[in-house]
Image (cartoon, rainbow, N blue to C red):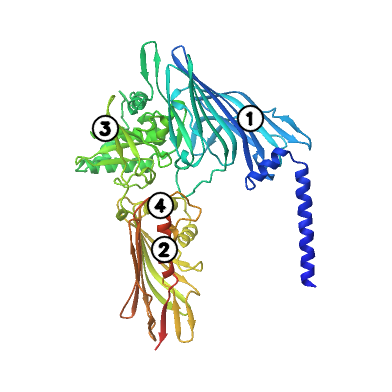
Amino acid sequence: MTAIYYHIKTLVVLFVLTVNYTAINGQSSQEFKKYKLLYPKANAVTLHSNSDIKIFLKNDEIQIIENLSVETLYLNATAKYNSERSISYSSFYEIDKLKASSFIFDGKKYREKKVDEFKNSDEFTSSFHDDVKNISFVYPNLSTGAKSTLSYETKIKNPRFLKSIFLSQGRPIAQKKVTFHVDNNIKLDFKKFNLDSIDVKFSETKNKSEAIYTWEINQVPEFEYNESIMSFRSQIPHVIPIIRNYKIKDDEINLLNNVQGLYNWYYDLIKNINSEESYTNLKPLVDSLTQNKTTELEKVKSIYYWVQQNIKYIAFEDGLGGFVPRNANDVYAKKYGDCKDNSSILDVMLDLANIKGYITWVGTRELPYKYSEVPTPIVDNHMILTYIGTDSTFYFLDATGRYLDIDRPSSFIQGKETLIAIDSANFLIKKVPIVEVSKNIEIDSCFITIKENKLVGKATHIYNGYPKTIIFSDLEGEIKTEAIKSFYKQELEKGNNNFLIDSIHEINKYEYEKPFIVNYSFSIPNYIKKVGNNIYINMNLSKDLSYTKPENTHKGRVEYKYKASHTNYYELEIPQEYEVKYLPENISISNSIFDSSIEYRKKGKIIIYKHTLKLKNIALKSSEIDFFKNEITKIEKQYKEVIVLSKK
């Protein structure tokens, strides 16, 4: 009877689902049915995206106007969450001729409902200020099977800010076409990235007045973003258009023909900052900071660390203000600024100490470009100051960082090229070093005893390098004692979630150039297992290597914030009436990606356990990922091993 009941119930459910599906499809357009079948997991599909960009000369200046139109079809109930939209513009981009509509299918045809209200507002957050404004609106009555259209004109006011052409997105694209109409006196170039994964059609034609370039794609599936990579630009297919130069009569003007063209524009923006200024407030401060410092490097450290601690980072982007540092006096008076402002005050303070600093542009790891291949403002998004030591060592000083020792650049610019301003005509391109694994250390050491059915331990955790800067950043937000204890419970947890912190003592908290040390005591109730005369204990209390293992969804490339070294060193006291019956075998693995080992040994009445990990790269190629995962699996098998103590 039970089997018959469930059989009947299943048939009823299937019947209801079939009726509902038929009803929905009966009210749906053929277009909806087609794309629901093509992309069953997608929330929406871009039916058409057409961009027409005209680049021409007017009054001896480059003019750029883009007309964009997009049509979107919604494939499920998430349509209503896409109703609210906004378009951004700024002093670099002017929006005009904005139109938007919903199209609702009534069973026979689509009926248009125009958006009749557009609201302008500033884009603002508590830590970021810019001149970007939003035009927001709401598509009416979006639902499953509905469509929306959007069209507007953009005037790009600076020819250096041509937008990238992204040939994939977070939803499938049925058709996309981008066309450039370019005056024959303007040389336009294209840099292509990651186009191997899609079928792209490109065409080029010329007539007497202009060149026409067309990029077109059809039926491109949804772009699957790999979250283990810091930059979506290193994954997504895209093209960067670059205006190299243009002619006015017989004169050829270099715009972004090479790095020199970009540098000339950058330098022109900064050449007049902090010129002929009086620094009556800064000079005494610099004198006090450098007093009794015997070497130039010691003076630089003192000034650099002061700026890190006392000038709060708040991002400002206001037209060209997004590229021009503010006056050092203003930054000192306000005690806050963005990356350019921090570099400005640091530059002046070093100069007041008779030390030369160099304004430096750099792109974070979010921007996977080199200056030689993309000499446009899209190549970088950050400003720092470079100090060249008396021994010719380059120090990349990011004063927006917190608790960064002078020999450690910000982790997010490791391995990236910098553009260092020497003078009005000369610059250097220098790569930021990747900090060696030996400088980014975590060591957790414990002395552990068994009390009844729990482990009780006294421990020391040492942080140095990037792990130290990260935990200092986290701790700055934790003020109350209970909040700190809760933080450390999560940070230092070992064994299982029964782990309890009993006491905490911090040493060198917020100190530069010293390891941060946390002495703590802990207990782990119900961790050990007693069976008859035997005690079973898994000494793999912290499985650090597993946290570095790429997920199955990580395809193509994996990135880490920094090279890392972890050591877990535990001493377990053997209870008086027990002896060691079994110790797991040791294991050691070494390759070009990582070194790791687990070692056990007995010393008197102590069992010593040591687990080491050295992650030797900050990025893995696709060809290395499977090998890395397989090697980690070998260590993970050892994580299941237990020691056995037996009663004498």
- Sequence order check: which comes first, mark 1 or mark 4? 1
Mark on residue 351?
Answer: 3
Quarter occupied by the N terminus: bottom right
Q: CA distance from mark 2 to mark 1?
A: 58 Å
Residue 137 falls in which quadrant of the image? top right
Residue furthest out toward the bottom: 648
Which mark, by number, is residue 648? Answer: none
Q: Within 10 angstroms of label 2, few (less than 14), some, or many (20 or more) residues?
A: some
Q: Marks 3 and 1: CB-CB under 8 Å?
A: no
Amino acid type, callout 3? Asp
- What element does badge 3 sit on? helix
- Count neighbours of disc 1 (C-alpha within 10 A) and say few if under 14, some if 14 to 19, many if 20 or more: some
Tell me the residue that label 2 is attached to.
Answer: 504
**Mark 1 to mark 4: distance in Å?**
42 Å
Q: Residues within 10 Å of mark 3 (few under 14, many from 20)?
A: some
In terms of secondary structure, where does tag 1 sit? strand
Where does the image place residue 251, in percent across and percent down from the top left?
36, 13
Q: Nearer the viewer, mark 2 or mark 3?
A: 3
